Amino acid sequence: MMAMVINSTQSMVNHIYDYYLWTLTLSDDRTKGWLLVDSPLPTFIYTIMYLAIVWIGPKLMQNRSPYKLTGLLVPYNLSMAILNGYICIQLFTAATRLKYSYVCQPCRANNHPDEMQIAKAVWWYYFSKLLEFCDTFFFILRKKDKQLTFLHVYHHSTMFTLWWIGVKWVPSGSTFLPAMVNSFIHVLMYSYYGLSALGPAVSKYLWWKKYLTILQLIQFTTALMMGINGIRTGCDFPLWMHYALVIYMMSFIVLFGNFYVKAYVTNAKRRTPLREINGNALNNGYHHAKIH
């Protein structure tokens, strides 16, 4: 009996490995040899390390004083805003010159300079998801454990892996749009967090924080509609990517919707002042609802 189980397990593993080798034949040759791209192991290992730190970090900080990290938070957030701005501009300019469709754009696996510019920008977008692990690490060091929500950890741990898949198989075509839109939103978000880290003297002038929530909701909904439309019309883009987009966006709409109800609707019914509602939403969970 045990021998049958072992043989069955071994056979299943071999089938999975053979399927993985087959999928590699469909990957985009343009990104071969790029940092972290060829093998899934680096991405997988970094993600496991991230989850391990999320689990053990708060325990290690339990009897320690929180770190302020002001001198680190400001340059980190502003650097991330600059990086996302660079990614957004690179994607927008190349897609414009190539006359990319915002509804359905096939992936052209050629080495045209503008196509390569898009592929490289998508790689930077993927790499930025690794850098964004620092968001969580700073929460742990500052003992902001309430901000380590399921939504926050789920978002950070999955985005890095999903965008490895993107840069490995479809680093151009319709892939450019969600990366471009999200990078633009991240410019606003990281700019806000960088400026707010300077203290109350600056943060009181940052009136636009509540509009970031609206942009997030629009982003999720638009991406969901884009995926559904691609499936419905038979867009010449990998079908599995459309389904992955739809499922992933639905998960974020559910999780973010739950946060939104708790932060805005529930608090509003309790007649909490609007300023306090916005502050609580930002400090206790809004940052974790962003889609990187």
Image (cartoon, helix red, strand yellow):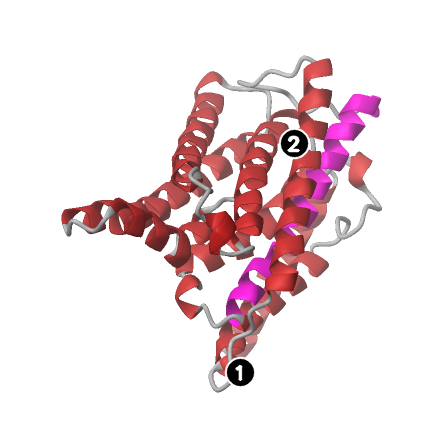
Q: Position of residue 130 (x, y in %)?
A: 65, 55
Where disc 2 sits, the SS reads helix
Q: Residue furthest front?
A: 201
Q: Position of residue 142 (x, y in %)?
A: 51, 70
Up/down of 1 relative to 147, above or below = below
- Number of the label disc, if any, that sits on residue 60: 1
- Residue 176 visible in the shown view: yes
Q: Which residue is painted at 83% across and 23% down in the image? A: 113
Q: Which residue is painted at 60% across and 37% down in the image? A: 183
Instruction: Give 137 or 272, whichever is nearer the viewer.
Output: 272
> What span is in magenta?
111-140
Q: Main secondary structure of the magenta part?
A: helix
Residue type marked 2: Cys
Quarter of the image for the C terminus: give it: top right
Position of residue 216 in the picture relative to residue 44 (left or right): left
Q: How many discs mark residues in the rendered view?
A: 2
- 237 part of magenta stretch: no
Up/down of 174 relative to 28, above or below = above
Query: Dot 2 surroundings within 10 Å: few (below 14), some, or many (20 or more)?
Result: many
Where disc 1 sits, the SS reads helix
Q: Earlier in the sequence, mark 2 or mark 1?
A: 1
Marks 2 and 1 sit apart, C-alpha to C-alpha, by 38 Å
Position of residue 67 in the picture relative to residue 127 (left or right): left
- 119 part of magenta stretch: yes
Q: Which residue is painted at 69% across and 55% down in the image? A: 40
Q: Which residue is painted at 54% across and 56% down in the image? A: 197
- Where on the picture, by quarter, is residue 213? top left
Q: Which residue is mark 2?
A: 88
Instruction: Tell me whether circle 2 and circle 1 mark residues in contact (CB < 8 Å).
Output: no
- Where on the picture, by quarter, is residue 247? top left
Up/down of 84 relative to 137, above or below = above
